[in-house]
Image (tube, coloured by chain):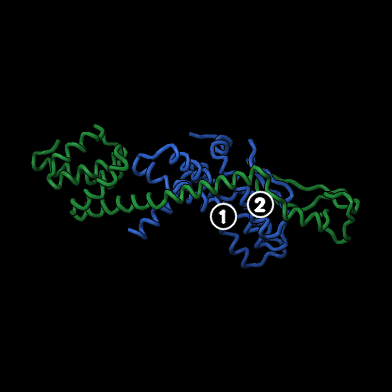
Amino acid sequence: MTIPGLIISIATFPGVIVHEIAHQLFCKWMKVPVLDVCYFRIGNPSGYVIHEKPEEAYKSILIGVGPFFINSILGALISGSSVIAVWTFEGGSFIDYALLWLGISIAMHAFPSTGDAKSIWAAVTNKKGNFLLKLIAAPICALIYLGALGSMFWLDLFYGIAIAFALPNILASILG
Amino acid sequence: MENLDVYEEENTTSTLEAEDTGVCVICKYRVLREDNQTGYCDDCREDLIKRPFPLWIKIMAVGLGLVVAASAYKYPVSVKQLVAYNEGIKSFKAHETDKAAVNFEELAKAYPESTEINAWLYLSYCYQMNFDKADVVYAKLPKDLKGLSSELDTEIDGFNKVMDSTGGGN
């Protein structure tokens, strides 16, 4: 069944907002001026951050991939405590279900967009981008495009669920 | 009009348009340096770097912080339950069904309706020949055991084979 991206964005809007906040945070940390921000809207794209082109290509990479780390970590922290109760033990309260929805929604939007990939690639292929950065950026961009392709097959949802399960299972295997 | 080179983090293209008057496009009064490429002055650029988050985003961030704190508070219990569950399965597979039953009994107190936990507990009691307790747990199990973990499915198949060979079972 194909569900339009717009409906998915609305259903998982906290993830879109956190994604854009993460871009803006990384811009702030990299001291890159932010010209415009839209945290969420009903449309395509569902959110964006317009910023000045950084002089250093590595800053573009960090701004581009920032949401991957922020959304993944936040998603794992929020949903990890509920996923076992809801999924494994078929129990859990309303709060557990709410936490699971919130955490998976956030983790689902961890993947940078193809727009992010374009920005990263443009930054490393300009005259200031060195070979090492291209070497780092190439697999990142390839993974982003693969992720975009995979989202047609619910890869982002599967990633969100996997992130929810990851932390409690890692902790249990350490403590068990 | 001059198009300024800007980046957008999503899949649309956009440019900031600056009037070619030599004045900052944002504050509209500071004169730009001749080598200025951006269209805005250094002071405005600093302001853009420090662009504050809107109040509703700050409130949402505080809310998310509270949610993370609440989730972190629940984490030890969830992890402890997962450890007990994993240890229960491990003990069961090692034929230490008494140990396994203790783990699953604890979990069944927290999740009395869980088919997964009750099925493991039922099997543990059966292998212990504790059929009184097994019957009580069996009553909680649905008639059609669907959607169980593959590990549990395998154990149920194994148990059914044992029952078939001995002519017993529910």
Q: Which residue is painted at 52% across and 43% down in the image? A: A105
Q: Residue furthest toward the left?
A: B166
Judge from the rendering whether residue A38 lies leftward or rightward of residue B163; answer left or right.
right
Along the viewing direction, whichever of B80 and A143 lies nearer the viewer: B80
* Label 2 chain ID: A
Kind of residue sitting beneath label 2: Gln
Q: Residue furthest toward the top?
A: B143
Question: The C terminus of chain B is located in which quarter?
Answer: top left
Badge 2 marks a residue whose secondary structure is helix
The chain letter of the green chain reads B
Kind of residue sitting beneath label 1: Ala
The chain letter of the blue chain reads A
CB under 8 Å between discs 2 and 1:
no
Judge from the rendering whether residue B157 lies leftward or rightward of residue B79; answer left or right.
left
Badge 1 marks a residue whose secondary structure is helix
Residue that badge 2 annotates: A24
- Tell me the number on the disc at residue A142: 1
- Quarter of the figure with residue B145: top left
Judge from the rendering whether residue B67 lies leftward or rightward of residue A52; answer left or right.
left
Judge from the rendering whether residue A140 lies leftward or rightward of residue B99; answer left or right.
right
Crowding around mark 2 (Cα neighbors within 10 Å: few <14, some 14 to 19, many 20+) is: many
| In this view, B49 is above or below A83 | below
Coordinates of residue B50 in the picture (x, y in percent): 72, 55
- Quarter of the figure with residue B162: top left
Q: Which residue is painted at 42% across and 45% down in the image? A: A82
| In this view, B87 is above or below A43 | below
Q: How many marks?
A: 2
